[in-house]
Image (cartoon, helix red, strand yellow):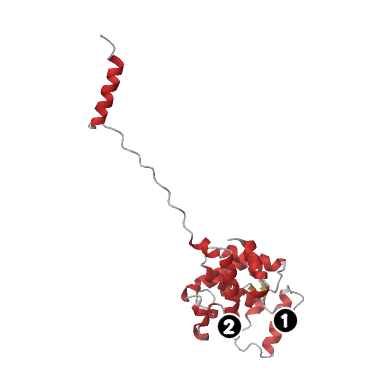
Amino acid sequence: MKRKTFFAALRARNSGLFGTSLTGPQVQGIDALLDAGRALPLHHMANVLAQVHHETGGGMYPIKETVFPHHKNKNPSDAEVIRRLDRAFAAGKLPWVKSAYWRGGAFGRGQLQITHTRNYTKFGITNYADALKLDVSARIAVEGMRDGKFTGKNLADYDFPSALDNPPRTNPRRIVNGADGSDDKVRTHHMAFAAALEAAGWQQARTARPAPVATPVVPPAPTADTPRFWVTFAAIIRSIFGGKK
């Protein structure tokens, strides 16, 4: 894939993704996702990128839970994240949460954030902070969506791109999160990323097959039963003894 072409397409004004420029962290985050998802079909890769775009507010890099685009400090301390979640929980702003999973440090981290100790374990992570490492975060995003480790739904469950128009219950957004009103937004981002991937040659890279290599045909070695052998043998004998009397 031609990454320069891909990033130029993302920066195009009509892409609707990032305006006309990308920051260093955005480029690095996207590169890591492309590397981790290099074996994915085009629309699967596009959906990973689109879901990350939504979950990070367009940042495309790993973040901690409670961090939003308007925050100047993109990497608050763990203690600050826990304080924010405690305040929100006490104020009844997290009605879907049954227990304060964050107090032991297992709050959300990554490009597609994982929470709860059991989910960190599911991805083989024992040190919570590792989920903020770019390569680890990208692996989690791709693996989680490919294998259905986030919600039980996976990329192969959907017929792209038509599935992007599905109603909330069967929309691909359910691979990552519940119905939160973001289906149309993620659909728009998906199609923009898909167009950029196609322009850069992702589809060709996924489907190209090496040209077959011709196998030379080697004739079998003559044997004593082959008539040509005796003709050749007789010619050799004549050349050696033919002139002698």
Q: Is residue 33 left or right of residue 170?
A: right
Image x and y of residue 83, in percent: 72, 81
Image x and y of residue 119, in percent: 57, 74
Say which amino acid is labelled 2. Asp
Q: Is residue 75 left or right of residue 54?
A: right
Say which amino acid is labelled 1. Arg
Label 1 secondary element: helix
Question: Residue, x 35% and y 42% (percent of image)?
Answer: 217
Image x and y of residue 181, in percent: 59, 86
Instruction: In the rendered view, tell whether residue 144 sits above or below residue 185.
Output: above
Q: Nearer the viewer, residue 190 or 81?
A: 190
Residue hosting label 1: 83
Image quadrant holding the C terminus, namely top left
- Asked whether residue 124 is in view, the answer is no
Question: Residue, x 53% and y 85% (percent of image)?
Answer: 168
Residue 63 position by quadrant: bottom right
Question: Residue, x 50% and y 71% (percent of image)?
Answer: 147
Q: Earlier in the sequence, mark 2 or mark 1?
A: 1
Image quadrant holding the N terminus, namely bottom right
Q: Nearer the viewer, residue 186 or 5?
A: 5
Q: Residues within 10 Å of mark 1 (few under 14, many from 20)?
A: some
**Image disc number at residue 139:** none
Label 2 secondary element: helix
- Asked whether residue 202 is in view, the answer is yes
Q: Residue furthest front?
A: 243
Residue hosting label 2: 184
Q: Nearer the viewer, residue 184 or 117?
A: 184
